Amino acid sequence: MDVATWAVEMLATARVARLATADRAGQPLVVPVCYAFVDGRIYSAVDAKPKRTRELRRLRDIADNPRVSLVVDVWDEDWARLAWVLVEGTAGILTTDLERTPALAALVAKYPQYAAMDLLSTAGPVIAITPARVVAWRAAG
């Protein structure tokens, strides 16, 4: 990934991202997600927070159209502090424990809330994003 060091750090440490998917017909969906950035890939799990179902639209969208975008950003009333990192790539659902276990461990390490909810044993599907393009911008050099 050929992107500025500050952008990689921002991607690694930001607490929330917005994941954009689109269904087969191109209808977009943007949702906030918790995520972990590990070895150049991005992971997000369907967790036990209250939802109507764990059969989420983002999962159906990825099955129909694996092209996704993910953005992390910094907003401040002082526009000299604005920054964002946009990742475009391909998403899939992890299917083996060999892939899922380290992804879930990274999420638990980043978010204490996931340790409290025992994400390692309660997680639903885990999304893995392989970046194809990363674009970053910040107001200050």
Image (tube, rainbow, N blue to C red):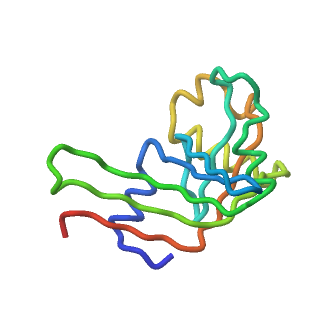
Above or below — where is 19 with respect to 53?
below
Compare residues 46 and 79 and report the one nearer the observer.
79
Q: From the viewer's perspective, tell me whether residue 45 is left or right of residue 35.
A: right
| Lateral position of residue 108 relative to residue 136, left or right | right
Quarter of image, res 131? bottom right
Q: Which residue shows up at 43% across the image and 42% down it?
A: 15
Instruction: Name the residue rendered at 42%, 64% in the picture.
Output: 8
Q: Position of residue 123 (x, y in %)?
A: 73, 33
Quarter residue 26 falls in: bottom right
User: Which residue: 79% across, 34% down?
Assistant: 55
Residue at the image point whose x is 54% and y is 73% from the top: 133
Q: Is residue 76 above or below residue 115?
A: below
Q: Quadrant of the C terminus?
A: bottom left
Q: Is residue 34 left or right of residue 56?
A: left
**Whole-percent x, y for residue 86 in the image:** 46, 62
| Residue 125 x %, y % | 77, 41
Instruction: Looking at the picture, tell me which residue is in the foreground, 27 or 48.
Output: 27
Name the residue nearer the viewer: 96 or 130: 130
Measured along the vertical axis of the image, is residue 111 above or below residue 14?
A: above
